[in-house]
Image (tube, coloured by chain):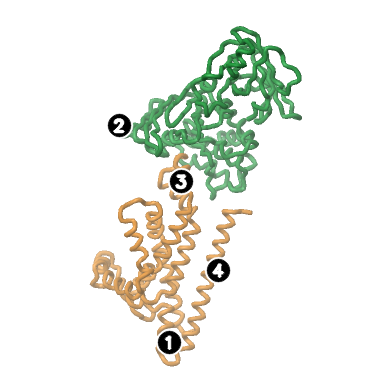
């Protein structure tokens, strides 16, 4: 494999990891709000979170460009006050990947929160734990399988993300050219089939490893919950 | 420890409108399912907010809707034992037990932990995970967990209701030890006369969300007005005696009363020399003017008639004094007439032993 190809693989792994980790706290917060919150506009929030799942990725990418581009509402603000530039940078790729994976992450976490017996949280309250500690000591550990599943789904989605990323941050080798974009690029040039095939094998390997990791973690957690 | 409580709350079909005062010892909230017992307990614990209510414990106001005082559940320091245990599935038994101490104001001394573990007989379970425990073991751990959160009072919501008779018998002695050795004030919700009679010092009887009767177990269960016709089978006398001998082969125990002794089946573990209470349902007592012979009933107690009270049109309630104890019998007015029952007449109270089970 060439240096360019390795760079694309490394970049993909890096972008996907950052996207997953940064969206994790937001995912837990939103999932908790959606599962337990009783507030006006809950269904609107639910719709917004799920939007990237339904919209064509290119549309999501274009919206990101409008909002987070150099002259976008938020983009300008972030650049000026935090020095954070998103458009045509790997950070933008991470944002696009994170947003595309967000509905999957929230969905799996929300399901795991809804599966928690609320009576256990009640019991923790009578034992002296305030709502924050109830969340940390009871809710969070019990939703751990959902958190892990959500992270793996989000990571897998990020690895495969193409449309939104390429629309928002283009396809710059070494900066925003992820695995998928690199494969696409290979298919656009004559004689690129071999390179595309090499990267495809890498993609298969990474996906398979992620799947095995998730199965293994699920097995570990399952054994912890049901020791027999 | 004094607890004064009143509440008013609309609960679907009826309005819960009840109040009671509690002191040291065990106060039982007794009533059929749906009478509002659990709702009362939940308001006390701070698990639900009533429309109106006031709760004062030892002068500290924990709830006053008029003054807009609502101390949240985690700061009320009540140990709540739920009917379904509610152990944390992700924590070992030891960590479940210690959970409350993480949040307690002052650290729980190590000796306290050992004492509770010993009291409840859960030493061997400490490193188990909750789902490997039997129903009775889970409930014992749940009681220990509540005790170790250094509560001012235990609130127990039908802690035995989900268990079969054998498991109940396994736990009841621990509850008695809790009452007698730890001297922890307890509010105990139950629909079982047997449990209430065995454990409670005071009974508050609830019916459709209202307090129907309150007093000692004997007052409440012996009183003629406490029960509607549908609940007749629970009415009867409550006698206190000392377990004299125990026949393990037949699983029977002899209880020494003030004058006579009675034999009861050992549904629950009884220890020799301990004080026990026996509930004798009035409809399971027959009255004889001569000592009957060739009868399967093992308890034939000699006494005199202390009172004859009409109960409805065709029934009478006979109070039979046996030494210092009074046994109630509910028989038809026709029988009473046929036997020519009258005050101070010597009679025999015949109690079907099987009726004293559980």
- Residue B55 appears anywhere in the view: no
In this rendering, the label closer to the viewer, 4 or 2:
2
Q: How crowded is mark 3: few (under 14 residues within 10 Å), some or many (20 or more)?
A: many
Say yes or no: labels 3 and 4 on the same chain. yes
Chain coloured green: which letter? B
Q: Which residue position holds label 3?
A: A121
Image disc number at residue B157: none
Residue B240 at x, y percent in the picture: 61, 19
Chain that the image shows in orange: A
Q: Say which chain tag 2 marks.
A: B
Q: How far apart are marks 1 and 4 (CA)?
A: 29 Å
Return the x and y of residue B28 as percentages of the image width and height: 51, 28
Work out whether residue B123 can be spotted: yes
What crowding class fits label 2: few (fewer than 14 Cα within 10 Å), some (14-19), or many (20 or more)? few
Q: Quadrant of residue A65?
A: bottom left
Seen in the picture, residue B306 relative to B331 is either above or below; the reply is: above
Chain letter for mark 4: A
Label 1 – label 2 distance at C-alpha: 74 Å
Residue B67: image tag? 2
Q: What is the quadrant of residue B135 in the picture?
A: top right
Q: Nearer the viewer, residue B282 or B72?
A: B282
The residue singled out by tag 4 in the image is A212
Counting residues from the start of the chain, the first of labels 1 and 4 encountered is 1
């Amino acid at each position: 494999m060439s240096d360019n190809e390795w760079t694309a693989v490394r970049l993909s792994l890096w972008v996907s990891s950052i996207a997953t980790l940064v969206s994790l706290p937001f995912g837990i917060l939103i999932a908790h709000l959606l599962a337990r919150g009783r507030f006006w506009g809950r269904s609107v929030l639910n719709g917004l979170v799920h939007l990237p799942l339904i919209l064509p990725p290119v549309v999501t990418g274009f919206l990101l460009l409008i909002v987070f581009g150099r002259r976008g509402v938020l983009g300008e603000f972030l650049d000026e006050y935090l020095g954070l530039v998103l458009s045509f940078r790997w950070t933008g790729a991470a944002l696009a990947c994170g947003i595309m994976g967000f509905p999957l992450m929230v969905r799996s976490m929300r399901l795991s929160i809804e599966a928690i017996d609320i009576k256990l949280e009640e019991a923790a309250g009578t034992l002296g734990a305030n709502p924050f500690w109830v969340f940390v000591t009871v809710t969070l550990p019990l939703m751990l399988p959902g958190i892990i599943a959500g992270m793996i789904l989000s990571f897998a989605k990020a690895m495969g993300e193409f449309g939104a990323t390429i629309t928002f941050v283009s396809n710059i080798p070494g900066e925003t050219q992820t695995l998928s974009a690199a494969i696409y690029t290979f298919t656009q040039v004559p004689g690129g089939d071999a390179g595309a095939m090499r990267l495809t094998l890498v993609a298969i390997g990474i996906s398979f490893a992620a799947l095995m990791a998730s199965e293994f973690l699920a097995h570990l957690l399952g054994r912890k919950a049901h020791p027999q | 420890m004094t607890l004064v409580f009143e509440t008013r709350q609309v609960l679907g079909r009826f309005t819960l409108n009840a109040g009671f005062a509690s002191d040291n010892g065990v106060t039982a909230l007794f009533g059929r399912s749906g009478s509002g017992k659990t709702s009362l307990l939940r308001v006390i614990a701070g698990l639900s907010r009533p429309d109106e209510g006031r709760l004062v414990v030892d002068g500290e106001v924990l709830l006053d809707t008029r003054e807009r005082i609502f101390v949240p559940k985690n700061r009320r320091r009540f140990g709540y034992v739920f009917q379904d245990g509610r152990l944390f599935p992700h924590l070992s038994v030891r960590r479940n037990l210690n959970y409350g101490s993480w949040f307690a104001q002052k650290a729980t001394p190590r000796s306290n932990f050992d004492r509770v573990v010993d009291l409840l007989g859960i030493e061997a379970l400490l490193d188990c995970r909750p789902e490997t425990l039997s129903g009775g073991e889970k409930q014992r751990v749940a009681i220990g967990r509540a005790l170790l959160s250094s509560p001012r009072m235990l609130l127990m919501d039908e802690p035995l209701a989900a268990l079969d008779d054998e498991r109940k018998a396994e736990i009841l002695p621990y509850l008695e030890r809790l009452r007698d050795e730890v001297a922890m004030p307890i509010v105990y919700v139950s629909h079982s006369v047997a449990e209430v009679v065995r454990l409670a010092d005071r009974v508050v009887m609830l019916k459709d969300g209202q307090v129907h009767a309150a007093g000692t177990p004997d007052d409440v269960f012996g009183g003629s007005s406490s029960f509607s016709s549908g609940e007749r089978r629970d009415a009867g006398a409550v006698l206190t005696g000392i377990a004299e001998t125990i026949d393990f082969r037949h699983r029977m125990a002899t209880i020494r009363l003030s004058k006579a002794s009675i034999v009861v089946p050992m549904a629950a573990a009884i220890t020799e020399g301990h004080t026990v209470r026996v509930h004798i349902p009035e409809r399971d007592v027959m009255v004889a003017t001569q000592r009957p012979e060739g009868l399967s009933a093992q308890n034939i107690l000699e006494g005199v008639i202390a009172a004859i009270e009409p109960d409805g049109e065709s029934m009478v309630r006979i109070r039979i004094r046996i030494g210092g104890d009074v046994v109630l019998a509910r028989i038809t007015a026709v029988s009473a007439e046929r036997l020519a029952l009258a005050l101070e007449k010597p009679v025999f109270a015949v109690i079907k032993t099987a009726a004293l089970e559980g």
